[in-house]
Image (cartoon, coloured by chain):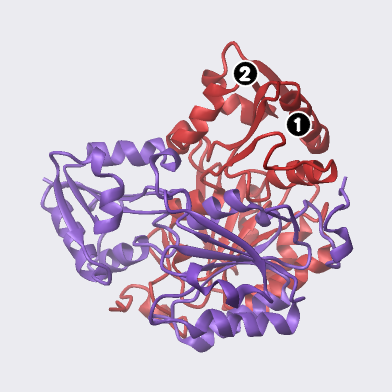
Chain colours: A red, B purple
């Protein structure tokens, strides 16, 4: 008997922003696997189920275990916060399955359940930064060479993209966002709006709206559950909000901040 | 008496991928505003409510009406598919409110409810393309000059970003994706995987996995409810899936397609 593997995104840290399909998959499952923190987010849904909690950095072991459990007949939910399709576990699961010659048509059934990722949740909290084209960049150089990330930041700057930064910093990883800021300052005004959203939709949520110039003053807000959004030439602030208009403003103009021109 | 304005993303075209908060907001509202198509997606939730259906291209009128209704004391849900924070109505609402001197602290309460956008839903359906940095670009040049979009495509190509394309084409807007393909072919292998996902999670859903070379053969799959995902140098296909590994592969190698190297 073959089971099934759900790779479930439960969204940001409260149930409100979970999808019905995510809850349904967890309820259908007899086995739950995930980081301690993520599993705790859904603790009320998993009573009576077999639960495997993992520590950070055990992704490969976790992926193998999920696949093995599902192959042995279990219905398994591998849970994560946000969306497992964005820097999440979907890739590793498919890599391992592909290596084993798995056939999606008649092999182990696998379903990825998309969720509200940090780019969705943080944008909603800070205003409307993603009304225009944007680039999503992770500062984590554990698995990606730093020079590749630098190249991407340069490209995003040249393309005048709004930039959403995942994994901006950790205790040991500090210089990456600082270097990114330096690169961006070659292309963008120091007054370019920057938002740091920490713990979106969790009880501990904190939001800072600053600019490229002031970003170093808020390093205490950076960490594993923070997301940084950096505006482009069209982004302006209004009160505590970061707004991108629908259309394209060719030049960032401070005078327009209080009276943005409506593009109709 | 002041009402409230919810800007609600209901996710892709079925209720499974709607969040609990989105459903809750719609149920709380006495007034529903939205495109005909979007309103129809939630028809079972809006019985007995005042419903204002709009045709496409009436965004500004719709935004004003939502604000006016909410100011008059109504609890209003402006509904859209996907995530209203990504190329959605959030920006226009904030632009209009900012122009009127609105204060988020004591003025009309506005809440953006994030949802599963096309980038989330389409990635989940096609495999794991967004395990690495990606750029999101709209091909619509109604409000953004085409040369800006070209600059962004060039930048995304140079930065080796996976590219998610919103609004790839419409009946009148054909050349943009063709031009984008030409630009990308200057930088990327013709065998770079490309997915076209149409009507994600709707009954009419169709998915095509092709490559940059073959993209022109599938123009019948392009349209207002299609999303195109273009791989980067690390992307490979396995069966009907488009996979990006966790780490960075410096070189796209056809021989590795059937036996991807596992990055551990």
Q: Residue, x 23% and y 53% (percent of image)?
A: B107
Which residue is denoted by mark 1 in the rendering?
A67
- For residue B35, say whether it is visible: no
> As rendered, which of B70 and B176 lies closer to the eye?
B176
> As rendered, which of A100 and A63 lies closer to the eye?
A100
User: Outermost residue toward the top?
Assistant: A48
Host chain of mark 1: A
Q: Is residue B110 above or below residue B232?
A: above
Horizontal side, residue A135 vs residue B242: left or right: left
Residue B177 % position (x, y): 54, 79
Q: Is residue B31 above or below residue B253?
A: above
Whichever of callouts 2 and 1 sits on the residue coming sooner in the sequence is: 2
Which residue is denoted by mark 2 in the rendering?
A30
Q: Where does the C terminus of chain B fall, quadrant-wise? A: top right
- For residue B163, say whether it is visible: yes
The answer to whether mark 2 and mark 1 are in CB contact below 8 A is no
Report crowding for label 1: few under 14, some 14 to 19, many 20 or more residues within 10 A (C-alpha).
many
Q: Residue, x 77% and y 53% (percent of image)?
A: B245
**Element assignment for label 1:** helix
């Amino acid at each position: 008997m073959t089971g099934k593997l759900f790779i479930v995104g439960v969204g940001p840290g409260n149930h409100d922003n979970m999808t019905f399909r995510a809850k349904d998959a967890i309820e259908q499952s007899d086995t739950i696997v995930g980081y301690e923190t993520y599993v705790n987010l859904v603790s009320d849904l998993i009573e009576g189920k077999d639960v495997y909690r993992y520590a950070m950095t055990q992704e490969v072991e976790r992926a193998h275990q999920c696949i093995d459990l599902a192959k042995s007949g279990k219905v398994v939910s591998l849970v994560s916060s946000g969306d497992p399709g964005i820097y999440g576990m979907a890739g590793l699961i498919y890599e391992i399955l592909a290596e084993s010659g798995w056939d999606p048509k008649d092999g182990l059934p696998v379903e990825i359940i998309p969720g509200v990722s940090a780019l969705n949740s943080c944008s909603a909290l800070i205003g409307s930064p993603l009304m225009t084209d944007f680039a999503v960049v992770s500062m984590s150089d554990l698995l990606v060479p730093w020079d590749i990330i630098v190249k991407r930041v340069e490209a995003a700057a040249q393309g005048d993209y709004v930039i959403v930064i995942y994994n901006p910093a950790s205790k040991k990883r500090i210089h990456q966002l600082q270097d990114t800021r330096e690169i961006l300052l070659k292309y963008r005004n120091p007054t370019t709006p920057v938002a740091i959203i920490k713990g979106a939709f969790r009880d501990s949520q904190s939001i800072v709206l600053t600019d490229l110039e002031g970003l170093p003053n808020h390093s205490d807000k950076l960490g594993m559950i923070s997301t940084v959004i950096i505006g482009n030439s069209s982004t302006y602030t209004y009160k505590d909000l970061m707004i991108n208009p629908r259309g394209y403003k060719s030049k960032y103009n401070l005078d327009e901040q209080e009276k943005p021109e409506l593009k109709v």
